Image (cartoon, coloured by chain):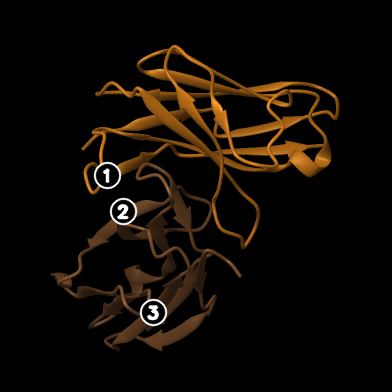
Amino acid sequence: GAVVSQHPSWVICKSGTSVKIECRSLDFQATTMFWYRQFPKQSLMLMATSNEGSKATYEQGVEKDKFLINHASLTLSTLTVTSAHPEDSSFYICSAREHWGVNTGELFFGEGSRLTVL
Amino acid sequence: RKEVEQDPGPFNVPEGATVAFNCTYSNSASQSFFWYRQDCRKEPKLLMSVYSSGNEDGRFTAQLNRASQYISLLIRDSKLSDSATYLCVVTGDSSYKLIFGSGTRLLVRP
């Protein structure tokens, strides 16, 4: 099946620094990728939809200037957490869909990136 | 009210037991429904889609009741390897947008 790779798996950074997370679709083209965040014992929350060649669509309450998304190619989307703070510590997961449309296409997830901000 | 609600559990069952999870969703416009499985500190993986007619995949059976906005997952003959968190997932206002429940944790003991 389709594979989505996410890097890095773990990252620890100091408060105030920026962290970039990469999400790659390895064997298919993904015009749309999704970024989720999951806090312990909570559900995955969609942060934004990343569209290749255009601006990302952010969910309500997600700061677009803090969570920068770039989807420059059909196989790569990046999420940059700018000026990270301890409350940004979370599990960030990207996903991509191989086919577009209702009831079509499984959503494939990257392995996730666990961010810890000290 | 949450868009997708699940009993967090944990459900602690012996090997071989049958266990059922329920899920309710609030958006009557939702069109697609799924069960995902998530192991501890791992990404979610699709377990099965849920169709109006109900569907079965080996030991797993999923049911959808649109009138009651209710989804269920039945696991028969539980294995130790079934221990995980099961996420109920529905599409939102847009077909591509998935709304995740917070998950039901299953622990299968020897």
Q: Amino acid at mark 1?
A: Glu
Give the answer, above or below, for where B49 lies relative to B69.
above
Q: CA distance from mark 3 to mark 2?
A: 16 Å
In the visual, does B96 lie left or right of B54?
A: right
Q: Residue at x 51, y 58 (%)?
A: B40
Q: Residues within 10 Å of mark 1 (few under 14, many from 20)?
A: some
Image quadrant where one finds the N terminus of chain B: bottom right
**Position of residue A99 in the picture relative to residue A48 (left or right):** left
Mark 3 neighbour density, 10 Å: few (under 14) some (14–19) many (20 or more): many
Q: Are marks 2 and 1 in contact (CB under 8 Å)?
A: yes
Query: Considering the numbered disc 3 on the image, is that residue within a helix, a strand or a loop?
Result: strand
Q: What residue would you read off at disc 1?
A: A106
Helix, strand or loop at label 2? It is: strand
What residue sits right under mark 3 in the picture? B21
Report x, y in % for residue A5: 40, 29
Q: Callout 3, which amino acid? A: Phe
Q: CA distance from mark 2 to mark 1?
A: 7 Å
Determine contact: label 3, label 2, CB under 8 Å: no
Q: Which residue is mark 2?
A: B46
> Which-is-in-front pick, marks 2 and 1?
1
Question: What amino acid is found at the position of numbered circle 2 in the picture?
Answer: Leu
Q: Chain of mark 3?
A: B
The residue shown at (40%, 44%) is B94
**Figure quadrant of residue A107:** top left
Q: Colour of chain A?
A: orange
Give the structural element (helix, strand or loop) at label 1: loop
Q: Which percent across, then down, holds residue B63?
A: 25, 75
Q: How many marks?
A: 3
Residue A35 in percent (x, y) is at 52, 35
Q: Colour of chain B?
A: brown
Other-residue count near label 2 (Cα within 10 Å), few / some / many at <14 / 14–19 / ≥20: some
